[in-house]
Image: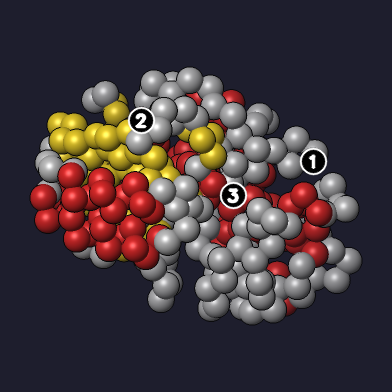
Amino acid sequence: MNLEKFGEGAQKLGVLGIKVTQDGVLKAQQLWDEECRRNVYSASKSFTACAVGFAVKEGLITLEEPLTEAFSEDLPETIGENLKKARVRDLLTMCLGQESGNLMGAQRPLYEEEDWVKMSLGIPFVYEPGTHFVYNNVGPYLAGVLVQRRAGCDLVSYLMPRLFKPLGIRRPMWESDPTGYTFGAGGLFLTLSELHKFGLFCLQKGSWGGKQLLPAAWIEECAKRQSDNPYGYLFWTGDKNSYRADGKYCQWSIVFEDKNAVITIVAECRDGDALKELVFGELYPQL
């Protein structure tokens, strides 16, 4: 694969590194900065989706459990009808029912409340769950908290034997909330190669090293649109039958099932549309 034309545009857009694997072979890689662990921002959500999948597999949670049962000790004094209708599944689709995004990056340092679980559930559920897409960190955060409560450990410890260690990822750093819960909506730090391994794990539908770590059906559900918007279970869906773990400033691991390929990028890019045009215009045709 020729990265020359891509590289010219990529450097201008702030791309720091790229890896391309197809049919199990590393076809191209390029670093424009040293490969260190960086914040992958909302790409963290896709790891939380897998944590939920492991918890479902192990019988710790079910997707149809009402939030009023899952978080019975954290509910507001007045429980609205829409909150009563919300299920664990709604935490994964960005259709939770709240009107705007909360627990976002610029908001988190400013909260006076330390109990973000109670705070999150106290935000009005304006819409019936499943009817309105609103990008919101509350859902993945609560999903991660639920896994941690049921498993009795933080998300990193939960995922170490199930995902990180099998993929050869040494214990990573992950942001936590004021009470110590891993923040499942963001703040995971990984290298380009580690994020790329995760994309390959998804391409292989939860299989790694000849072992089925996570049920293939769960990866398929994560990669499938769950509403009218291009979003699955904490993964974005995209052109050319692709789906991706996607973090702010273009931390991407894009899975192209039809091409049996993964393209992973870490960047400090503020023009995601231009970078997507570059990926789909210069790289995809070479797959």
Residue 136 disc label: none
Give the x, y percent position of residue 209: 26, 23
Please identify the quarter of the rendering in which residue 222 is found.
bottom left
Horizontal side of residue 23 vs 56, given as left or right: left
Residue 192 higher or lower than 45, as above or below: above
Task: Tally the numbered discs.
Answer: 3
Residue matched to label 2: 193
Residue type at tag 3: Ala
Measuring from the top left, give residue 128's x and y in whole percent: 62, 78
Of mark 2 and mark 1, the one earlier in the sequence is 1
**As shown in the figure, which amino acid type bears the numbered disc 2?**
Ser
Disc with the residue nearer the chain's start (2 vs 3): 3
For the residue marked with disc 1, what is the amino acid?
Pro
Label 2: few (<14), some (14–19) or many (≥20) C-alpha neighbours in 10 Å = many
Label 1: few (<14), some (14–19) or many (≥20) C-alpha neighbours in 10 Å:
some
Q: Nearer the viewer, residue 190 or 210?
A: 190
Q: Is residue 3 left or right of residue 211?
A: left
**Which of the two discs, 2 and 3, sits closer to the camera?**
2
Q: CA distance from mark 3 to mark 1?
A: 14 Å
